[in-house]
C-alpha cells in the first residue's frame, strides 16, 4: 500500500477547494457581488450624508437637498435588499456545501472501500468526515466571500478616492488597507498559530477523555474509580481553560490593535485632508467626503484580519479532504466485462500480503463447487479472513489466480461477483434503523415470508418475534442489548436473504452457543444443495458438517479431510 504524501501550497489547496464547489461557485460569485454592492450602498448612505453636511457648510455641491435625501433613502432600501439576498445566498451555499462535501467524501470512500476502512487509521477517517467538513464550511461560507468582498470594496474605494477626491487620500487608504488587510493577518497568524494549535489539541483531548469517561461510566462505578476519574476530568478541564485564556488574551489583543490601526489611519486621513484643504488642493466638500470614505471603508478589511486564527486549520482540513478525493483505490471495480452464475471456484497458487515485507498467504490452492460445504480451519491470524476477502476482490491479489466457472476473477464484473458471492463477516454492523430495514439491505424486494424464513435459518426468528415491536424495532434502541452472537445471526439471516450461490462464512458461530450453533449448522446443511458454502472457523467442532476441510498454517494451505 503506497501512501501519497504530497504537500500542497495554500494557493493550490484554495483553488482546488474552489473547483470542488462546482456550480455553487456561481452562487458564491453572486453572493460576493451582492455583499460588495451592499457594502458600497451602505458607504453611499454615509457619503451622501456627508455631502449634505458639506453643502450646509457652504461647499459647492451640484445635488439639491431633495436629491441628497432621496438618494440616501433609496440606497438605504437597496442596502436592505442586497443584505437580504447576500445572507440568503450565504446560507444557501453553506448548507448546500455541507451536502456536496459529504457526498464527495462518501463517493471517495465508496471507491476506496472496503480496503480503506480496514486501515488502522479508520478512526481518523471518521474524525475527518465530521470535523474537516465543518471546518471547510467555515472556509467557504465565511472566508472566501469576505476576502473577495474586501478586495472589491477596497479597490472601488481607492478608485473613488483617487479620481474624485485626491491621490493623497487614496494613498492613505491604500496603506491602511494593506496594513489591516494583509500585514496584520500575516503577523497575527504567526503570533496566534501555536496557541491556536495547542488550544484545539487540548480541546479534542478533553472531549475524547470526557466521552470516554461517559462511555465507560459503568466500569468506573464498578471499580469505584469515580473520584479519581473526576479529578482527571477537572485537571484536563483546567488545562483547557488555561489554553483558552491564553488564546483569548492574544486574540483580544489583536482585535484591539486592529481597532487602534483603524483609528490611527482615520486620524491620518483627517490630518492629510485638512492639510490638502489648507493647501487649496481640495475644497471642504471633498475633504469631508474623503475623510468619511476612509473612516467608513475599513469594515471589510477588518473582517479579513479576524480570519487567520482558523486559516491554517482550514488548509490542513482541505488537504486531508483533497488527499482522500485523489487517493487511488487498491482495487478498481470491474464493469463491462463478463457476468456469471456461480457453479464452481478454483484458486491456484494464490499469494497475498498487506505490505511488501510480509506474505500472509502463499501458494494457496483450493476449490469448491455447488452442493458442497468446504471448511477452512486455522489458528487466529493465520489468514483465513484474508482469503475470503480475496475471493470477494476486496483486496488485490499479488500472485496466482482465482477462477469462477473458469472465468478469471479479474474479468468478472464486480456487480455480478457481489450478486453471486456473499460474506458474513466476524462482526455484523446494524444500521440505526428498524430490524426489517436492516434485513432488507440484503434484498430490498424480500417478502415477509422470506424474511421469516431467513430468520429461522439463522436461528434468530424467536428473538426478533419476542421484541416489543418485532420487525419494526429500532436496532439502535436495542444497542448493546443485542449480544455479539445475536448480531452475528442477523448477519447470517442477511446472507440467506441475499440468496447468493456462494456464501462465505467467517467464524459464523464463534459467538453462538452450542444449541444455536447446531441449529445454524443444520440449516446450512439443508440449504447446501443449490449453494456452495465456505465455512471458516478456528473451531474443530464446526467442521463436522463440512464435506471437505482445508487447513491454513503459516500462510500455506493443505487439504486435511
Ligand atoms: N487490513 C490489514 N492490514 C494489514 N494487516 C492485516 C490486515 N488485516 C489482517 N492483517 C494481518 O494479516 C494476518 C491474517 O489476518 P486474518 O486473515 O484476519 O487472520 P484470521 O482470519 O485467520 O484470524 C494477521 O497477521 C493480521 O494481523
Ligand atoms: Mg478472521
Image: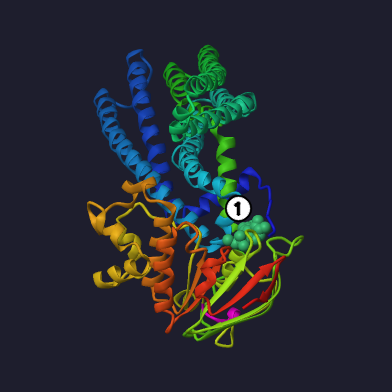
Label 1 crowd bin: few (<14), some (14–19), many (20+), radius 10 Å: some
Q: Position of residue 223 (x, y in %)?
A: 49, 28
Q: Determine the quadrant in which ligand 2 lies.
A: bottom right
Q: Residue at x 39, y 38 (%)?
A: 35
Q: Residue at x 33, y 26 (%)?
A: 45
State the residue in front, 232 or 81.
232
**Magenta run includes residue 126:** no
Q: Is residue 37 left or right of residue 21?
A: left
Q: Is residue 14 visible?
A: no
Residue 197: x and y, percent?
60, 30
Which residue is depicted at the point 51% across and 50% down? 18
Q: Residue at the far right: name it.
A: 357
Judging from the image, what secondary structure is the residue with disc 1 in? helix
Q: Describe residue 411's horizontal placement relative to residue 437 as left or right.
A: right
Q: How is the image coloured?
A: rainbow
Q: Quadrant of the C terminus?
A: bottom right
Q: Does the rendering let one see residue 319?
A: yes
Residue 542 or 423: which is nearer the viewer? 542
Q: Position of residue 331 (x, y in %)?
A: 60, 68
Q: Is residue 410 magenta?
A: yes
Q: Position of residue 255 (x, y in %)?
A: 52, 19
Residue extent of the magenta highlight:
409-413
Pick whichever, 89 or 122, lies toward us: 122
Dominant SS in magenta: helix
Question: Height in image: 357 above or below 98?
Answer: below
Residue visible at 62% across and 59% down in the picture: 380
Which quarter of the rendering shows the N terminus? Answer: bottom right
* Front one among 119 and 375: 375
Q: How many marks?
A: 1
Note whether 259 is above or below 117 in the view shown: above
- The residue beneath circle 1 is 323
Amino acid at each position: 500500500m503506497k501512501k501519497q504524501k504530497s504537500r500542497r501550497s495554500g494557493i493550490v489547496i484554495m483553488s482546488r477547494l474552489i473547483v470542488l464547489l462546482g456550480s455553487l461557485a456561481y452562487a458564491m460569485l453572486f453572493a460576493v457581488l451582492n455583499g460588495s454592492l451592499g457594502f458600497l450602498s451602505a458607504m453611499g448612505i454615509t457619503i451622501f450624508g456627508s455631502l449634505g453636511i458639506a453643502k450646509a457648510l457652504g461647499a459647492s455641491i451640484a445635488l439639491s437637498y431633495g436629491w441628497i435625501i432621496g438618494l440616501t433613502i433609496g440606497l438605504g432600501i437597496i442596502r436592505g435588499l442586497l443584505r437580504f439576498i447576500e445572507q440568503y445566498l450565504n446560507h444557501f451555499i453553506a448548507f448546500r456545501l455541507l451536502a456536496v462535501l459529504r457526498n464527495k467524501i462518501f463517493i471517495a470512500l465508496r471507491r476506496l472501500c472496503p480496503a480503506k476502512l480496514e486501515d488502522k487509521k479508520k478512526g481518523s477517517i471518521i474524525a475527518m468526515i465530521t470535523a474537516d467538513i465543518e471546518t471547510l464550511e467555515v472556509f467557504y461560507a465565511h472566508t472566501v466571500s469576505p476576502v473577495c468582498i474586501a478586495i472589491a470594496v477596497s479597490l472601488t474605494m481607492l478608485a473613488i478616492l483617487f479620481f474624485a477626491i485626491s491621490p493623497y487620500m487614496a494613498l492613505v487608504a491604500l496603506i491602511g488597507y494593506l496594513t489591516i488587510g494583509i500585514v496584520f493577518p500575516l503577523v497575527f497568524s504567526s503570533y496566534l498559530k501555536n496557541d491556536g494549535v495547542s488550544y484545539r489539541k487540548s480541546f479534542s483531548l478533553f472531549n475524547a477523555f470526557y466521552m470516554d469517561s461517559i462511555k465507560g461510566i459503568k466500569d468506573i462505578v464498578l471499580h469505584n474509580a469515580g473520584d479519581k476519574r473526576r479529578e482527571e476530568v477537572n485537571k484536563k478541564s483546567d488545562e483547557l481553560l488555561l489554553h483558552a485564556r491564553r488564546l483569548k488574551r492574544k486574540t483580544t489583543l489583536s482585535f484591539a490593535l486592529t481597532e487602534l490601526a483603524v483609528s490611527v489611519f482615520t486620524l491620518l486621513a483627517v490630518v492629510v485632508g485638512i492639510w490638502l484643504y489648507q493647501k487649496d488642493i481640495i475644497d471642504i466638500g471633498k475633504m469631508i467626503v474623503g475623510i468619511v470614505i476612509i473612516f467608513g471603508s475599513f469594515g471589510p478589511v477588518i473582517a479579513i484580519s479576524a480570519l487567520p486564527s482558523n486559516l491554517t486549520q482550514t488548509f490542513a482540513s482541505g488537504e486531508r479532504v483533497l488527499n482522500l478525493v485523489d487517493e487511488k483505490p487498491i482495487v478498481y471495480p470491474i464493469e463491462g466485462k463478463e457476468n456469471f452464475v456461480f457453479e464452481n471456484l478454483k484458486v491456484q497458487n494464490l499469494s497475498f500480503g498487506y505490505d511488501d515485507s510480509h506474505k500472509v498467504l502463499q501458494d494457496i490452492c483450493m476449490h469448491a463447487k455447488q452442493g458442497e460445504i468446504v471448511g477452512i480451519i486455522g489458528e487466529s491470524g493465520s489468514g483465513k479472513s484474508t482469503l475470503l476477502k480475496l475471493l470477494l476482490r476486496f483486496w488485490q491479489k499479488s500472485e496466482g489466480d482465482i477462477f469462477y466457472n473458469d472465468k478469471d476473477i479479474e474479468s468478472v464484473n464486480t456487480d455480478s461477483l457481489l450478486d453471486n458471492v456473499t460474506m458474513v463477516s466476524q462482526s455484523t454492523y446494524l444500521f440505526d434503523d428498524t430490524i426489517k430495514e436492516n434485513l432488507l439491505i440484503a434484498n430490498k424486494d424480500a417478502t415477509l415470508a422470506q424474511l421469516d424464513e431467513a430468520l429461522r435459518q439463522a436461528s434468530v426468528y424467536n428473538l426478533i418475534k419476542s421484541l416489543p415491536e418485532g420487525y419494526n424495532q429500532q436496532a439502535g434502541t436495542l444497542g448493546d442489548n443485542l449480544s455479539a452472537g445475536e448480531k452475528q445471526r442477523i448477519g447470517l439471516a442477511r446472507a440467506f436473504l441475499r440468496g447468493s450461490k456462494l456464501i462465505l462464512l467467517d467464524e459464523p458461530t464463534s459467538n453462538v452457543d452450542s444449541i444455536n450453533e447446531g441449529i445454524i449448522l443444520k440449516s446450512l446443511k439443508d440449504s447446501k444443495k443449490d449453494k456452495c458454502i465456505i465455512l471458516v472457523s478456528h473451531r474443530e467442532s464446526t467442521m463436522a458438517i463440512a464435506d471437505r476441510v482445508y487447513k491454513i498454517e503459516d500462510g500455506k494451505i493443505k487439504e486435511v479431510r
